[in-house]
Image (spheres, rainbow, N blue to C red):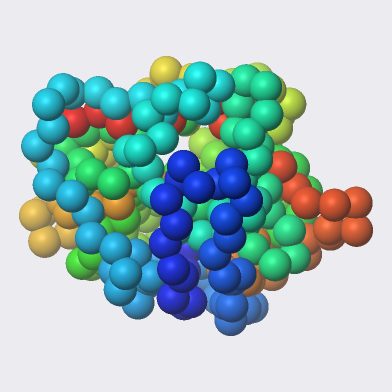
Amino acid sequence: MMFRANILFAAFACVALGSAVPGEVLGARSGRDLDAGLQHTVSDSRVVNGTPSVNKRAITSYTVDFAARTGLSDITISRCSKNANYTTGFLDMQIDATCGLEFYYKYKIVTGKIEALMKVPTGDGVVTGISMYGQNGDEIDIEVQGINTKQMVDMYYYKNTAGLTPPNPIVAPNSADLSADFHTYGIELLTNSINWYLDGVLVQTVSKTDAATYPTLAGDFPMIGLYTTSRFGDDVGTPDYTGGPKHAYIKWAKFTHY
């Protein structure tokens, strides 16, 4: 992912009241490699306008339950709050021609895990992202591209340098269409390894071989969002919103501190 606009932050609790933040104003990056497109930049609005809280918390695991609307104070919308809509049993995350919803967990995860139970959208030009993003350019990602929802793409960066070239696609078991139902996605950052999970199953591990090339500080901002060609270029196709916004549905997000 690559962010270039400064976005004012809005508290997540305000979403139900219809509060909005400015839309995305992002430059297309047609022709760039996808591994570069997956990456955030140090000019990201979260670095400019947001600071992660201390990592020490009273308990180990925190769940934001969108059905029960509990835990909402633990997250902040960083982009496009107008496209967050509560419905029965989940949060309807939307992306349209103006912007896509993104939120982040307020607390730094030094070592730990981010998980989310989501149903992702299908269609060209739409990407669902689950990430850990560090202010120094460290980053760990899961992306599900609407152009191919039978796989998720794993990636990490250390100080803005791609650690997997090209990014690693993980095909869903039995080539299942991930957009057809809810699935649990997870990223785990440990002292000496990174783990990626799909439906609770470990699907990839990268072990630390050199501290200089390991994303130790990726846990500053654990986040979830919907993105499009304005960040990924033409590699993911051209979005079509003539039928309305694209939707991702999320039942819960869980943040665990080790």
The residue depicted at 12 percent of the width and 47 percent of the height is 54
User: Residue 232 appears at what percent x and percent y?
Assistant: 59, 66
Count of numbered tags: 0
User: Residue 88 appears at what percent x and percent y?
Assistant: 67, 22
The residue depicted at 59 percent of the width and 46 percent of the height is 17
Residue 175 visible, this angle: no
The residue depicted at 84 percent of the width and 59 percent of the height is 240
The image quarter containing residue 200 is: top left
In terms of depth relative to the viewer, which is nearer, 69 or 61?
Answer: 69
Residue 195 is left or right of residue 169, and the answer is left
Residue furthest out toward the right: 242
Residue 239 is left or right of residue 72, and the answer is right
Residue 155 visible, this angle: yes
User: Residue 101 appears at what percent x and percent y?
Assistant: 57, 53
In terms of depth relative to the viewer, which is nearer, 204 or 146?
Answer: 146
In terms of depth relative to the viewer, which is nearer, 109 or 33?
Answer: 109
Residue 12 is left or right of residue 100, and the answer is left
In terms of depth relative to the viewer, which is nearer, 37 or 17?
Answer: 17
Residue furthest out toward the front: 17
User: Residue 67 appears at what percent x and percent y?
Assistant: 55, 21
The residue depicted at 62 percent of the width and 20 percent of the height is 89
**Quarter containing the C terminus:** top left
